[in-house]
C-alpha cells in the first residue's frame, strides 16, 4: 500500500472513531474494578489521491487494553493494529499489519513515595504520527514513508509529605524511518535525565535545585545535540490565590553534524511565572529565556485566562517570542469546549517553537475543530477540521502546511454492535512545494467485548 493510501485509510478510521490507540492512563484515572476490553472493527475502504489510483481494501482493526490496580499499585497494557487486504496501484494482491501500537505502564504509590514506569511503541505513516508529537518537539512532515517510535520513561518522587523531597526522571526515545522520499529524515536516538530537590522553607516559600541533561544522536548528516542545565528556583505563595515561581541557571548546548563539527553555546536561562486562581478559573503568565537546540537564544512571554463554566471550558492566551535570528512574533492560544444535552463542540489553537533535524528553527501552529451531534439515542454524527503548519524561521526553507477534513456517522445496531461510515479528505504542501491531495471513504462495523476480572 502506498503512503497516501495508508494515510487515507488511517484518517478514515480516526474520523469514524475506529482507530484504537490507547493513551497511557495515570493512577488518578484508574478507578473501579480491573477491566479488559477487546475491540474489532471490520470494514471496507475506498481511497484515492493526487499521485495514486483509486483502490478498494478490506481492513480489520484490532485493539486490546487492560487495567489492573490495587490500593498501592497499577499495571496497564494496551495493543492495537490494523490488518489490511487489497491491491496496490499495480493491481497486485497484498496484505499487511500496520498502525501498530503498544503501551505498558506500571506504578506504585505510597504516602511519601511515587514511582512510575512506562514503555511505548508506535508504527505508522510519517505524516500522521508527526501530528501527534507535541508542538515543541518536531516539525510537520509530509512523506509517503513509515516511522517507528520507541519511548521509555521512569519517574520517582520522594518526600511527598515532608519538607524535603524531590524527583528523578529518566527518558529514552528512538525514531526509525523507512521507505521515505525525503533525504533529510534521519533516524535518531534521545536520552535524558532530570533531577529536582525541593526544600519547603515554610508553608508559603519553597526552594528547589534543578539539573538536567539530554543527548540526541541523528544518523547521517542530522544535527546531534547535547544539552545540560543547572539552576535554582523559588516557589512563593504570595496570597491564598496567587502563586509565583522563579527559576534561573546556566545552559550549555553542543551541536554538531559529524566529527570535528561541534559548536558550543553557553548562556544563562530564567523562567518567571505566576498563577492566580479565580472562582471561575485562573490567570497564568510566564516569561522565559533560554537556548534552543541549535544554541540560539529565544525569549518568550505568555499570558492566558482560563474560565471553568458549567457547560464547558474556555481558555484564551496571547504572547510574543523573539530569537537571535528572528523578528518579534505574536503567539496565540485558544481552547474552547462546550457540552450541550445532545451535542459537544471543541476548538483549540496552539503555537510553539521547535528545531528540525537540520537545525532549522521553526514555529508550529495547530488548529483543531470538532463537532459531535447526537441525532437519536442510537445515532450520532461527527465533523472535524485540522490545520497544521510549520513556518521556518530561516530563509531558503519552504514552509509546510496540511489540512484534514472529516465526517463520520455512527449507528448502534445492538448493544455490542455499531455501524460506522466516514469520509476523510486531506490536502498538504511539502517543504519542496509539492502538493498532495487524497480522500478516503470507510464503511464498517465495530464490536467490543468488555469484562472484569
Image (spheres, rainbow, N blue to C red):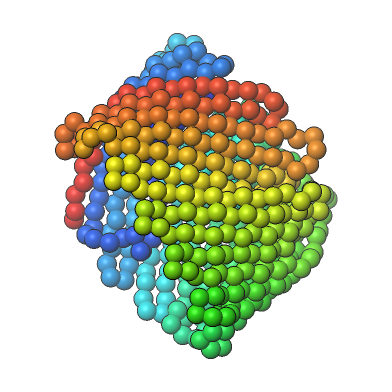
Give the left or right position of residue 290, taking residue 71 as reference: right
The C terminus lies in quadrant: bottom left
- At a point 79% along the width and 48% down the height, the residue shown is 326
Horizontal and vertical percent position of residue 147: 54, 37
Residue 98 visible in the picture: no
Residue 235 quadrant: bottom right
Give the left or right position of residue 39, taking residue 114 as reference: left
Horizontal and vertical percent position of residue 378: 21, 35
User: Which residue occupies the extreme left position in the image?
Assistant: 414
Along the viewing direction, whichever of 302 and 245 lies nearer the viewer: 302
Give the left or right position of residue 33, taking residue 424 as reference: left
- At a point 67% along the width and 45% down the height, the residue shown is 363
Q: In the figure, 32 relative to 249: above or below?
A: above
Horizontal and vertical percent position of residue 163: 50, 86
User: Which residue occupies the extreme top position in the image?
Assistant: 91
Q: What is the number of callouts on the image?
A: 0
Along the viewing direction, whichever of 378 and 389 lies nearer the viewer: 378
Give the left or right position of residue 265, taking residue 300 as reference: right
Horizontal and vertical percent position of residue 195: 58, 71
Q: In the figure, 250 relative to 329: above or below?
A: below
Q: In the figure, 313 relative to 344: above or below?
A: below
- At a point 29% along the width and 42% down the height, the residue shown is 342
Residue 320 visible in the picture: yes
- At a point 55% along the width and 65% down the height, the residue shown is 283
Amino acid at each position: 500500500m502506498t503512503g497516501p493510501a495508508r494515510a487515507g485509510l488511517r484518517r478514515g478510521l480516526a474520523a469514524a472513531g475506529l482507530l484504537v490507540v490507547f493513551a497511557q492512563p495515570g493512577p488518578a484515572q484508574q478507578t473501579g474494578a480491573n477491566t479488559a476490553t477487546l475491540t474489532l472493527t471490520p470494514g471496507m475502504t475506498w481511497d484515492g489521491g493526487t499521485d495514486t489510483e483509486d483502490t478498494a481494501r478490506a481492513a480489520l482493526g484490532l485493539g486490546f487494553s487492560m487495567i489492573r490496580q490495587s490500593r498501592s499499585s497499577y499495571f496497564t497494557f494496551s495493543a492495537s493494529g490494523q490488518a489490511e487486504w487489497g491491491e496496490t496501484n499495480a493491481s497486485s494482491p497484498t496484505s499487511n499489519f500496520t498502525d501498530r501500537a503498544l503501551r505498558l505502564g506500571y506504578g506504585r504509590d505510597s504516602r511519601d513515595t511515587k514511582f512510575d514506569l512506562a514503555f511505548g511503541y508506535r508504527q505508522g505513516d510519517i505524516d500522521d504520527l508527526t501530528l501527534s508529537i507535541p508542538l515543541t518537539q518536531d516539525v510537520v512532515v509530509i512523506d509517503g514513508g513509515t516511522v517507528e517510535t520507541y519511548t521509555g520513561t521512569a519517574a520517582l518522587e520522594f518526600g511527598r509529605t515532608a519538607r524535603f523531597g524531590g524527583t528523578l526522571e529518566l527518558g529514552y526515545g528512538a525514531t526509525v524511518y523507512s521507505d521515505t522520499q525525503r533525504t533529510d529524515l534521519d533516524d535518531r536516538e534521545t536520552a535524558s535525565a532530570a533531577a529536582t530537590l525541593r526544600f519547603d522553607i515554610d508553608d508559603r516559600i519553597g526552594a528547589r535545585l534543578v539539573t538536567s541533561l539530554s543527548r540526541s544522536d541523528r544518523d547521517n548528516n542530522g544535527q546531534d545535540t547535547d544539552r545540560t542545565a543547572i539552576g535554582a528556583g523559588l516557589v512563593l505563595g504570595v496570597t491564598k490565590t496567587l502563586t509565583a515561581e522563579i527559576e534561573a541557571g546556566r545552559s550549555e548546548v553542543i551541536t554538531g553534524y559529524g566529527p570535528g563539527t561541534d559548536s558550543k553555546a553557553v548562556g544563562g536561562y530564567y523562567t518567571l511565572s505566576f498563577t492566580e486562581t479565580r472562582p471561575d478559573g485562573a490567570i497564568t503568565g510566564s516569561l522565559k529565556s533560554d537556548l534552543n537546540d541549535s544554541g540560539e537564544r529565544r525569549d518568550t512571554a505568555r499570558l492566558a485566562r482560563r474560565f471553568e463554566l458549567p457547560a464547558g471550558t474556555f481558555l484564551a492566551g496571547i504572547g510574543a517570542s523573539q530569537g537571535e535570528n528572528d523578528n518579534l512574533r505574536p503567539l496565540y492560544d485558544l481552547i474552547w469546549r462546550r457540552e450541550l444535552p445532545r451535542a459537544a463542540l471543541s476548538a483549540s489553537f496552539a503555537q510553539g517553537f521547535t528545531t528540525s533535524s537540520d537545525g532549522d528553527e521553526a514555529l508550529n501552529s495547530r488548529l483543531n475543530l470538532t463537532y459531535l451531534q447526537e441525532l437519536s439515542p442510537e445515532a450520532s454524527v461527527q465533523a472535524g477540521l485540522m490545520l497544521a503548519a510549520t513556518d521556518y524561521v530561516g530563509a531558503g526553507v519552504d514552509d509546510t502546511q496540511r489540512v484534514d477534513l472529516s465526517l463520520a456517522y455512527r449507528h448502534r445496531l445492538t448493544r455490542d454492535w455499531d455501524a460506522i461510515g466516514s469520509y476523510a479528505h486531506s490536502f498538504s504542501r511539502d517543504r519542496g512545494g509539492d502538493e498532495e491531495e487524497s480522500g478516503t471513504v470507510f464503511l464498517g462495523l465495530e464490536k467490543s467485548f468488555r469484562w472484569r476480572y
